[in-house]
Amino acid sequence: MMEDKVLGILDDIYVAINVIKDNAATKEDLKAFATKEDLKAFATKEDLTEALKPYATKEDLKAYATKVDLKTMELSICDKISVKIGQLHGTTVELMKKEDTKTLEILEIMREKKFFDDKDKKRIVIMEPFAQMML
């Protein structure tokens, strides 16, 4: 029984050796491969490193903004612009109301001096942007 196992193992080794022998490269096969002289024509790591020096690396690019950074900046700028536009609108409305008050006072003075009558004043006062209802 032990002999059978040993014979089986030896038989397996014999088969493996024959497979290697039948499929191994010969000296003729190896002549088709590149030689050391052939390999000298290829670029080395040093050649590639030297050639790539002028180009940016990942480390170099880390100092610049990413798409996420730009989007965040864009949203921040848009928010600030919206706030400024709102403030400008409020300021403009406030100034226009002051001018409207002045205009109404000038109209009253002109009506009192008989430059025009109440009907003319009413036509002017009901105009935009701050139309007033006259009773």
Image: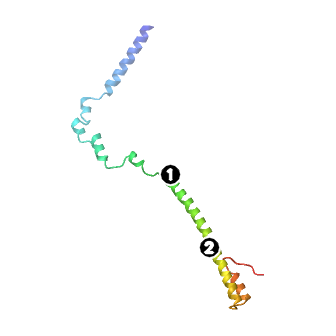
> In 3D space, how far apart are the residues under numbered discs 1 and 2 (Cα atoms)?
41 Å
* Residue 104, position as x, y percentages in the image: 68, 81
- Residue in front for this viewpoint, 80 or 17: 80
User: How many numbered marks appear?
Assistant: 2
Neighbour tally class for label 2: few under 14, some 14-19, many 20 plus, Cα within 10 Å: few
Quarter of the image where the C terminus is located: bottom right
Q: Residue at x 71, y 88 (%)?
A: 112
**Mark 1–mark 2 contact, CB under 8 Å?**
no
Amino acid at circle 1: Val
Disc 1 target residue = 68
Q: Element under label 1?
A: helix
Disc 2 target residue = 95
Question: Given this view, does label 1 or label 2 mark the residue nearer the observer?
Answer: 2
Amino acid at circle 2: Leu
Q: Residue at x 34, y 49 (%)?
A: 55
Q: Residue at x 40, y 15 (%)?
A: 9
Residue lying at the far right of the rendered structure = 135
Colour approach in the figure: rainbow
Neighbour tally class for label 1: few under 14, some 14-19, many 20 plus, Cα within 10 Å: few
Left or right, 116 with respect to 9, comes to right
Q: Which mark is residue 8?
A: none
Q: Residue at x 39, y 45 (%)?
A: 59
- Displayed quadrant of residue 24: top left
Q: Is residue 9 above or below residue 105?
A: above
* Residue 33, position as x, y percentages in the image: 26, 35
Quarter of the image where the N terminus is located: top left
Left or right, 51 with respect to 134, comes to left
- Displayed quadrant of residue 79: bottom right
